[in-house]
Image (cartoon, grey):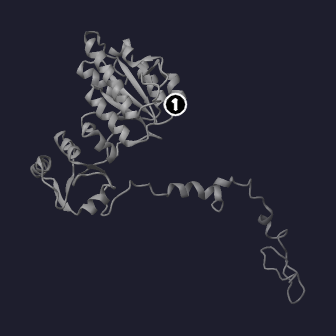
Amino acid sequence: MAGNSKRRGAVRRTDKANPTAGSGGRVRRGLEGKGPTPKASERPGHKAYRQPRATDRQPTRKRPTRRGGAVAGEWVAGRNAVLEALRAGVPVTAVYVAERTERDDRVREVLKVAAERGLGIGEVSRAELDRRTDGAVHQGLAATVPAYEYAHPDDLLQLASDAGEAPLVVALDGVTDPRNLGAVVRSAAGFGAHGVVVPERRAAGMTASAWKTSAGAAARLPVARATNLSRQLVAYQQAGLMVAGLAADGDLPVGELTLGDGPLALVVGGEGVGLSRLVREQCDVTVTIPMASGLESLNAGVAAGIALYEIARLRSRLRPRLRPARPPTP
């Protein structure tokens, strides 16, 4: 009600109708200013003040885990793949055998090596092994390994320098099928390449399927990841490598690549689209595989294998002319 406000400094009427002094009298500080209004980020009640502090309190995202809290790794499925992984010293953590699996020489050797190294050996049903390997053709035998550790692209040049050889690097531009990646890794290891480079995004990684297709070659040949493939090719060019892109409409047949005996980076395009525009513009030359007119293109893994065979044949014939690349700058 008017005249009965309890606000500080307000006029209060008494029973004797004798008003007391208000804020303009005794309480002068009520009329003093409080200074400029603080910024929104400095006011505790404002959204702009709470938002950055809420972000700081967000928990960090953890890596995906399996039941039991163990960090999820990769599965290697198939008798040859598991045997090659053990022979190459891959840090296998456990071996799984399906019930009623025929024990041939490969299975017996796997079990013997696993027992000598003190690895866990488990016998599970075939249905359970199908589930754990995501339906891969495991042939009754599979193994778990830690998540793949990718190399740095410069490490491949250092590897060639340590061997006193001209580097041969295979770069994959948008290959999304892990089986193609595994096939390229296998061909690269067989024809003397020093490693394979894949982009971080929109490309296949070293999954269990890639492991199996490589038939254990991934344990012997490093696979590196590049944040930006186009920039990495520029870095290879600055290190003295020639960049050759494999394309259906290339400038010359791969067998006529006369400079293929020197430091070389062979770029293989993805399934269907081939080389991307930016990567193709970065290539020093494009090469092709001559084919019959009825066939337009080859599978990325097959095409890489044929091209690497031609390059290996050229390098073996001209081996005295091999020139090492300049070591990468730190």
The residue lying toward the viewer, choosing from 127 and 198, is 127
Residue positioned 33% across, 36% down in the render:
183
Q: At which x and y percent is residue 216?
A: 24, 40
Please tell me whether residue 31 is drawn above or below residue 236 in the rendered image.
below
Relative height, residue 254 to residue 98 (above, below): above
Q: Which residue is mark 1?
A: 276
Q: Position of residue 252 (x, y in %)?
A: 44, 16
| Image coords of residue 122 (percent x, y) | 18, 60
Q: Quadrant of residue 101?
A: bottom left
**Numbered disc total:** 1
Residue reaching furthest to the bottom: 15
> For residue 295, which quarter of the picture?
top left
State the quadrant of the N terminus.
bottom right
**Location of the C terminus (image quadrant):** top left
* Front-lying residue, 219 or 286: 286
Is residue 222 visible to the viewer in this orientation of the structure?
no
User: The disc labelled 1 sits on which kind of residue?
Assistant: Ser
Residue furthest top in the image: 321
Horizontal placement of 263 versus 279: left or right? left
**Residue 160 in view in this figure:** yes
Residue sticking out furthest to the front = 294
In the depicted view, which residue is nearer to us: 40 or 307? 307
Q: Secondary structure at mark 1?
A: loop
